[in-house]
Amino acid sequence: MKCINCGTDNKLKDRTANQGRCIKCNHTFAFEPTSMSSVKITDPFFTKAIADISANNTLFFTAKQLLYFLDNRLRKKSKSISQFGWFFFYVFFNFFTFAFIIGPLIVNFVFIWIFFNRSRSSKLNNTSRKANAKNLQIIGSIILAIGILVSLASRSFNLFVIVAIMGMLSIYLGTRQLGRIGLLTQEFLFSESQFKDWLERWQQINGSILKVLPPPNQENTKATVNPDVTAYSFDRLVVCDSASIAQLLIANNFHFENNCAILSITGYPQSIFDTTMQMLRRNPDLKVYAVHDCNPRGISLVHNLRSNASWFLNSEIAIIDIGLTPSQIIATKRGMFIQSSPDSAQASKQLPQEVRQSLSAEELAWLESGKFVELESFTPQRLIKVLQKGIAGSRNLESDDSNLLLVGDTGNDMYVVQSFG
């Protein structure tokens, strides 16, 4: 493992002999992959992850975004069964057991079972799951091509039926899995407590990570704003369902670069919330952009903006739902980190009737199954680009090119962005 301080390559015996320090500069290694259990990370790996998620230290990010980012990188590193490797063993075991009629049937059943389970594994990434689904199609084709010839040669109708069923089943399972891989749920390869330990140890040894954001600070003390400033307003407002996302956007100067105000539904930033709302209400042409997690709380964000007197109750302003919505997840061709929990399923069944009416049956079924996606599963760079694209595409709400879907009655309009990025 290379030392991130001086670049010297330290072998295991060197690290062990020097009490986990570099043999050249004596810098302490934060991680020892050989002592880790299932998930193994190195100092260079962690360093590159920090550099990549921050776009070479130009963007701030949250600790949870780093957690998602590390998990994604580790999934890409995980070893998958090579095409040549499994095919070699597949041919070998079929040939080895060919003398027994039931032998090849058992071998093929085992391979189908293995690939099917791997095609839906929550511990693999979508690329690996797709590869396993395609392997199911390949095996099914082999079973049909060779198995039927053998059954005809042996004049066994029973074998013909078994082979036909097994081959078609394998092809069917592979095809079905390919069509639904992007909607399968995932689990983290490591726990959040493990990640916190890694982050703490890293910062103890290498110092604070400059671009990682602390938890949002809800200050009750109101800030003093120059009256000359409050005389103006904003044309746009971005409302987040969490203080963490609002803090992220503000820290990365999204409000300056896009001439908009940024607030969270929880009232962040507390110190200027009331003043900002007073400024916003002065503009009858204000456009509001809602950005949120795809979970019951996030899906209710637009409804809360419309029904809360502290926000836009009885107002005719346009609200654009940037996402994340179930329809965007279902329609996307790129896999998102979909999770599932009983609490989310229960909360989905208790959504207000107004929210339920704005969702399709497919979206409601998706939510009520307990599935959810967090915005922090996306990198800062992608979140910013998606939000910028959503704002740019809504300049003319009536345009066919705006990528917006109108939901609701006139005077209480809500626009939903059809694609998340």
Image: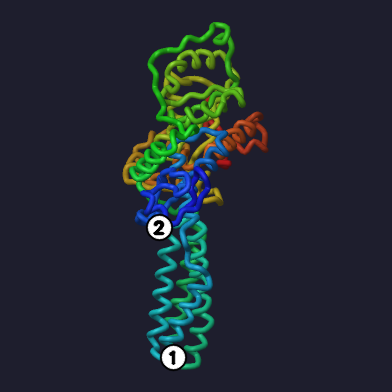
Residue 230 in the image: state x and y as whole percent: 54, 10
- Residue occupying the point 59% across, 37% down: 385
- Which residue occupies the foreground of this view, 272 or 6? 6
Q: Quadrant of the C terminus?
A: top right
Q: Amino acid at mark 2?
A: Lys
Looking at marks 1 and 2 on the same chain, the residue that comes earlier in the sequence is marked by 2
- Residue occupying the point 40% across, 64% down: 117
* Residue 157 visible from this viewpoint: yes
Q: Amino acid at mark 1?
A: Ser
Mark 1 secondary-structure assignment: loop
Q: Quadrant of residue 116?
A: bottom left
In the rendered view, tell whether residue 17 sits above or below residue 137: above
Q: Is residue 58 left or right of residue 116?
A: right
Mark 2 secondary-structure assignment: helix
- Which residue occupies the foreground of this view, 105 or 218? 218
Residue matched to label 2: 13
* Residue 406 visible from this viewpoint: no
Question: Which of labels 1 and 2 is toward the front?
Answer: 2
**Residue that sits furthest to the top in the current view:** 227
- Which residue occupies the foreground of this view, 184 or 56? 56
Q: Is residue 16 left or right of residue 381?
A: left
Residue matched to label 1: 156
Residue 181 in the image: state x and y as whole percent: 48, 57
> How far apart, in angstroms, are the residues tagged by discs 1 and 2?
62 Å
Q: How many marks?
A: 2
Neighbor class of circle 2 (other Cα within 10 Å; few <14, some 14-19, many 20+) is: few
Residue 302 in the image: state x and y as whole percent: 47, 30
